[in-house]
Image (cartoon, grey):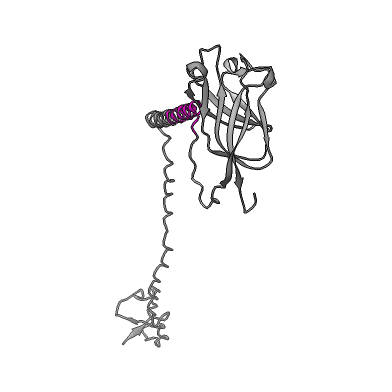
Amino acid sequence: MKRYCTECGAKLSPGDRFCTECGATVADTGEAAPPAAPHPPRTAAPPPRAPAPEPERVEPEPPRPAAAESAPPTKKSLFGKLVKIVLVLMALSALLGIALTAISHFAQIGWSVPTLNIGAPPPPKAEGPVRVFAIGNKEAVRNAPAVASRFRTDSPILVKSIQTYHWNNSVGRTPGTIALRASDGRVYGPWPASGQPGMGGVPNAYWLVHPEIVIPPGDYEIVDSDPGSWATNASAGQRGFYEMKWQVVKQDGKP
């Protein structure tokens, strides 16, 4: 006769004292117990869930090294720059010295530095006869005028020549320079003079220059570089002897 466990209804073998399924003590009744309700089928355990993926770690970017600052100039480079600056200054100083020497030389010999006048009006033209301003006579002379030799012009004039007299006790004088000084202080010249013999063959008794310049209207003084040998007398009003030749200048259509 088949036997079944009274607890779980599992089939028992003859002589079983314990249920092989649930372990319950089997009562020896000799009768087959009605089969118990079968155990509900065991459901398979759900498969383990896959672990959630860990968030990806983003490694922080290592800090970039700061741009290397320009290295400070070395002593060698500073010394090189200093040497260049000194050389440039020396060159400029040499050029300046040459220019000043040239200007001084031109001033001594009475030369004027030419200038380029682009678009300048044409120079005025002299017209009419050559006229003369002069102080002098045939009387005996002495040296060193006490009064300035002056003249006045009411129109622009072209100064063609100026002559001063240096009889100097019949020995003459090595020519120097002659200039014109306006009443406003402006100086025209000086111009280097050439010498000519005077009365009795006195060497360099006459100093002569040829300016060929135009001067504006105004009052002017004759400036001789050696007034100590310049001839004068009482009849000349103690003024130095001179003779200046000039012409009237016509400018802008007006005399």
Q: Which residues are magenta?
A: 94-111
Q: Is residue 212 above or below residue 239?
A: below
User: In this rendering, does residue 102 appear at all?
Assistant: yes
Residue 105 belongs to magenta span: yes
Left or right: 253, with 11 as reference point: right
Q: Main secondary structure of the magenta part?
A: helix
Residue drawn at point x = 32 percent, y = 76 percent: 16
Of residues 164 and 88, the one drawn nearer to the viewer in this rendering: 164
- Image coordinates of residue 80 in percent, x first then y, are 38, 30
Asked if 79 appears above or below 199 in the picture, the reply is below
Query: Which residue does the image show at 62% across and 29% down from the upper left?
Result: 134
Residue 34 sits inside the magenta stretch:
no
Residue toward you, 140 or 208 = 140
| x then y, percent, for residue 165 | 56, 21
Instruction: Identify the image quadrant of the N terminus.
Output: bottom left
In the image shown, does 250 or 4 lie closer to the viewer?
250
Across and down, in percent, residue 232 comes to 63, 18
Toward which corner of the image does residue 97 lie, by quadrant? top left
Along the horizontal axis of the image, is 96 left or right of 47? right
Of residues 191 and 102, the one drawn nearer to the viewer in this rendering: 191
Residue farthest to the left, as pictured: 14
| Residue 202 makes an appearance in the image | no
Using the rendered view, name the quadrant where residue 28 is placed: bottom left
Residue 195 spot, x, y in % from top left: 48, 23
Q: How many marks?
A: 0
